[in-house]
């Protein structure tokens, strides 16, 4: 008779994660996890571990303060955070490797659910003396064909910046890329060119740095939609909606930390 093996507990999950699983096997594992979660959700449980994937251009700016608030609201829950690029995040979310994803649109959201939280405006950052460093508000058409420093392939911020430039008339001409927002800003600081940043990064990366000029795009700025997503079959959807509301409020509080820049003050706008 062929033996059957039943693996339970954390060590078993690690063992399973090392096995070469097919797509169907991963889906079955995800469904099994959701059955366990459903039992807890039925009892109103708020405990265990929630695995949250966050894209790298959000994690350093959106998570500080938010995680502390989650610990206060849900003291019996552990939140395991992973920085993942959009494509990997979506793949792991669908496979049940993570429970929640904090990311920016656009992406293929088939099989996923969750609220769009805020629209985060982009801000142009340039070194002093650059053609785009004039004071005051900048218009999108001014960056058409400009040489911009962008994120490396795989980061949604790169695609979003290219879309902004394409909408202005011409895709950006660029030969310089960076692996992180912090590196992006240091390249601008060194005089290599200008870039587009999400407004939430300004207080950490730009404020107080000599030689950098930040300009807003006025009252209707281009930006990105920040969203919290989960599998549409998740039994914890009601609870995850609560987390989304906490995250939206947290993002709006970030408006108080965004420094003044040239032109209209950039502000994150709520979506409901």
Image (cartoon, grey):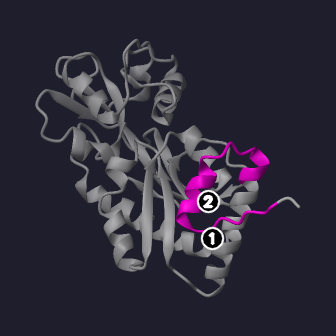
Splitting the image into 4 quarters, where does residue 151 fall? top left
Residue indicated by mark 1: 237
Q: Is residue 162 visible?
A: yes
Side of 27 relative to 86 (left or right): right
Q: Which of these two is toward me, 248 or 63?
A: 63
Residue 39 vertical placement versus 256 (above, below): below
Quadrant into which the C terminus falls: bottom right
For residue 254: magenta? no
Residue 219 vertical placement versus 210 (above, below): below
Give the residue displayed 67% in from the left and 51% down from the top: 95
Q: Position of residue 109 (x, y in %)?
A: 67, 48
Residue 171 vertical placement versus 167 (above, below): above
Q: Position of residue 43 (x, y in %)?
A: 62, 88
Give the residue displayed 23% in from the left and 39% down from the top: 205
Q: Which of these two is toward me, 152 or 32?
A: 32
Q: Are marks 2 and 1 in contact (CB under 8 Å)?
A: yes
Give the residue displayed 52% in from the left and 30% down from the top: 154
Q: Earlier in the sequence, mark 2 or mark 1?
A: 2
Q: Which mark is residue 112?
A: none
Q: Which of these two is toward me, 123 or 265?
A: 123
Residue indicated by mark 2: 230
């Amino acid at each position: 008779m062929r033996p059957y093996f039943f693996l339970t507990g954390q060590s078993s999950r690690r063992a399973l994660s090392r096995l070469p699983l097919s797509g169907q096997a991963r889906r079955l594992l995800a469904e099994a996890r959701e059955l366990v979660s459903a039992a807890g959700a039925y009892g109103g449980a708020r405990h265990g571990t929630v695995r949250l994937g966050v894209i790298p251009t959000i994690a350093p700016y959106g998570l500080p303060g938010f995680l502390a608030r989650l610990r206060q609201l849900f003291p019996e829950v552990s939140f395991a955070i992973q920085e993942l690029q959009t494509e990997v995040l979506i793949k792991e979310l669908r496979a049940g490797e993570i429970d929640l994803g904090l990311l920016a649109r656009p992406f293929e959201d088939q099989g996923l659910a969750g609220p769009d939280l805020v629209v985060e405006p982009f801000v142009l950052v340039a070194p002093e003396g650059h053609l785009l460093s004039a004071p005051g508000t900048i218009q999108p058409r001014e960056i058409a064909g400009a040489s911009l420093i962008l994120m490396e392939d795989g980061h949604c911020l790169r695609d979003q910046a290219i879309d902004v430039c394409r909408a202005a008339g011409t895709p950006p001409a660029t030969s310089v890329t960076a692996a992180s927002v912090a590196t992006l800003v240091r390249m601008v600081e060194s005089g290599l060119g200008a870039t587009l940043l999400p407004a939430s990064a300004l207080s950490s990366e730009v404020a107080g740095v000599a030689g950098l000029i930040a300009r807003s795009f006025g009252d209707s700025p281009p930006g990105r939609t920040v969203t919290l997503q989960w599998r549409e079959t998740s039994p914890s959807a009601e609870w995850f909606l609560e987390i989304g509301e906490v995250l939206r409020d947290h993002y709006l509080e970030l408006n108080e930390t965004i420094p003044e820049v040239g032109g209209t003050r950039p502000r994150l706008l709520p979506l409901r």
